[in-house]
Image (cartoon, rainbow, N blue to C red):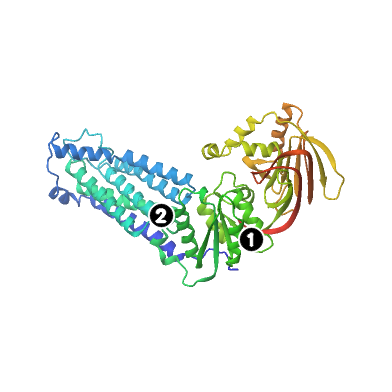
């Protein structure tokens, strides 16, 4: 197994710093020329023709200036930054946020420098904003054009598309410069200064966000010269991603940087959440299996990797991401990818569970890594609307819980390890391999994924206040009346009638008998160091 360490990138770091420093130096040098009057002759020779205020060319130029107004550009860049952040493209979002900050920075700098505005018939135009130098209008559109090209390249679009968008961005910047010059809203030196400022901001944004994760194909100097004799497999649930091609490019760029052999991509299906895909990954000799899917996909892949020694890395993409949250795996895809190759291996427990399917009158077996539940918990999972989960995420579980606010209790017989069966009345029986379960609730504060024990809570509330006590238990980590927790290596739960049953937040039907047995340290997972 190859070591998952980040390769040294001194040359790449030097490239990022040098590019940003040179662009800032170029802007500083041009600013010195402007402030010392050395560009006055240039502005005089290239003075704009006096366009009549009501002429067709004048009105078209002013309209174009309004469409490329710095405030509109700022709002657009901020919107893309927020969108990128929500799509878990954290580094790209950081770079875009830095770029957006360049627009007000240009306005502030122009006000501070106090270079006089050129006289023009369009002096009262709404498009005229800020001081003369650097031209905030040109700075904003240069930044906006950079954002356009960056988004295309960050998504690794085909070369022809990148070229098309680059030409479009260049034309947009040029037309804006012409419009500002033709209406007399900026001197040539102001336009050049605005462009240099925009380029400097763009390069600083790339440096802060990171050239490598955003534009890997711009900086191949950081790639290893030798191949590592290892390869990863990705088990992918395609329904969890809006842009599968983007995910593929991000993974392949990370794998390429580390010198690993090409990645094997295996998709799940509606009938199989990942069992067959994981088996194929093992048969293909994968040294690392990355799981890009929800809790059901993680559970299926985990079940197949048990005892193999092949580590599993998580690329969280579902609503719950239960195992990732409990192990401290970042929910941002870029950070999770870095962790997959630079984290440490941790052996965690897996729980084998056998339950009786009343419809088929047969036993079914499965493994889980987070939790299992009988009764109210499973009913809430079953009643949670999938479309609502996409909108309000974990809030959808609260909506389903309100629909089941007055559950009917049912009798259970609980056997721990080799002890005697204990009969109780309950509305919910929860088994946890970790402490935090669906909705971010910490039900088992002392649970550890590698403690060799399964935690159990039998919920037997008699009054509404008992549910308030459950909230106290979640906040304080203490047992509350009607919600006692315990732990064991083996748990057997039997009921006198079928009740809903769930595994890792996914409803799997109903049952009258469940037996869960801990398999200590059976699964290897990549976690933060």
Residue that lies at the very extreme toward the front in this rendered image: 360
Can residue 529 be spotted in the picture?
Answer: no
Within 10 angstroms of label 1, few (less than 14), some, or many (20 or more) residues? some
Coordinates of residue 132 in the picture (x, y in percent): 25, 42
Mark 1 lies on residue: 345
Q: Residue at x 47, y 46 (%)?
A: 85
Kindly identify which numbered label has been placed on residue 154: 2
Residue that lies at the very extreme toward the top in this rendered image: 464
Q: Is residue 157 left or right of residue 371?
A: left
Q: Residue at x 43, y 55 (%)?
A: 214
Q: Is residue 417 left or right of residue 153?
A: right
Q: Secondary structure at mark 2?
A: helix
The C terminus - image quarter: bottom right
Q: Is residue 50 left or right of residue 108?
A: left
Q: For residue 494, which quarter of the picture?
A: top right
Q: Residue at x 34, y 54 (%)?
A: 24
Residue that lies at the very extreme toward the bottom in this rendered image: 226
CA–CA distance in space, label 1 to label 2: 30 Å
Can residue 85 be spotted in the picture?
Answer: yes
Q: Nearer the viewer, residue 101 or 57?
A: 57
Q: For residue 56, which quarter of the picture?
A: top left
Within 10 angstroms of label 2, few (less than 14), some, or many (20 or more) residues? some
Asked if the residue under mark 2 is in contact with the one under mark 1, i.e. CB atoms within 8 Å, the reply is no
Coordinates of residue 100 in the picture (x, y in percent): 38, 44
The N terminus - image quarter: bottom right
Coordinates of residue 294 in the picture (x, y in percent): 58, 48
Q: Is residue 146 above or below residue 212?
A: above
Q: Residue at x 69, y 36 (%)?
A: 376
Residue that lies at the very extreme toward the right in this rendered image: 420
Closer to the chain start, of discs 1 and 2, is: 2
Q: Secondary structure at mark 1?
A: strand
């Amino acid at each position: 197994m190859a070591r998952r360490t980040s390769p040294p990138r001194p040359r790449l770091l030097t490239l990022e710093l040098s590019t940003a420093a040179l662009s800032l130096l170029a802007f500083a040098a041009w600013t010195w020329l402007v402030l010392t009057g050395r560009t006055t002759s240039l502005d005089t020779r290239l003075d704009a023709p006096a366009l009549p205020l009501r002429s067709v060319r004048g009105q078209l130029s002013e309209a174009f200036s309004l469409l490329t107004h710095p405030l509109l550009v700022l709002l657009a860049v901020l919107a893309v930054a927020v969108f990128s952040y929500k799509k878990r493209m954290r580094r790209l979002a950081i770079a875009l946020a830095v770029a957006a900050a360049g627009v007000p920075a240009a306005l502030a700098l122009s006000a501070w420098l106090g270079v006089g505005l050129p006289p023009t018939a369009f002096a009262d135009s709404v498009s005229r904003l800020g001081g003369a130098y650097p031209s905030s209008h040109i700075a904003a559109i240069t930044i906006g054009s950079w954002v356009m090209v960056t988004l295309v390249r960050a998504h690794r679009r085909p070369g022809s598309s990148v070229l098309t968008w680059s030409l479009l961005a260049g034309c947009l910047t040029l037309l804006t410069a012409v419009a500002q010059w033709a209406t007399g809203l900026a001197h040539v030196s102001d336009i050049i200064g605005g462009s240099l400022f925009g380029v400097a901001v763009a390069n600083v944004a790339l440096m802060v966000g990171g050239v490598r994760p955003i534009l890997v194909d711009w900086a191949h100097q950081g790639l290893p010269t030798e191949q590592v004799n290892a390869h990863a497999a990705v088990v992918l649930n395609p329904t969890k991603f809006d842009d599968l091609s983007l995910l593929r490019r991000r993974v392949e760029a990370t794998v390429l940087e580390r010198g690993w052999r090409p990645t094997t991509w295996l998709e799940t299906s509606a009938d199989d959440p990942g069992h067959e895909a994981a088996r194929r990954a093992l048969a293909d000799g994968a040294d690392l299996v990355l799981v890009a899917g929800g809790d059901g996909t993680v559970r299926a892949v985990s079940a197949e990797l048990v005892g193999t020694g092949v580590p599993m890395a998580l690329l969280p993409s579902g609503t719950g991401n239960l195992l990732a949250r409990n192990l401290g795996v970042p929910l941002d895809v870029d950070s999770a990818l870095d962790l997959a190759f630079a984290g440490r291996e941790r052996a965690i427990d897996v729980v084998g569970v056998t339950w009786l399917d009343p419809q088929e009158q047969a036993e079914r077996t499965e493994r889980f890594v987070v939790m299992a539940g009988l009764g109210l918990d499973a009913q809430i999972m079953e009643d949670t609307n999938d479309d609502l989960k996409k909108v309000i995420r974990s809030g959808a579980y609260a909506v389903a819980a309100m629909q089941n606010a007055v559950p009917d209790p049912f009798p259970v017989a609980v056997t721990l390890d080799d002890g005697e069966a204990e009969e109780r009345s309950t509305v919910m029986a929860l088994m946890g391999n970790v402490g935090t379960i669906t909705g971010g609730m910490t039900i088992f504060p002392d649970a550890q994924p590698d403690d060799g024990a399964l935690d159990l809570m039998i919920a037997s509330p008699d009054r509404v206040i008992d549910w308030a006590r459950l909230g106290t238990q979640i906040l304080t980590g203490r047992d509350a009346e009607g919600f006692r927790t315990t732990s064991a290596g083996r748990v057997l739960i039997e009921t006198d009638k079928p009740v809903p049953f769930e595994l890792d937040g996914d409803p799997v039907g109903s049952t009258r008998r469940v037996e869960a047995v801990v398999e200590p340290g059976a699964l290897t997972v990549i976690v933060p160091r």
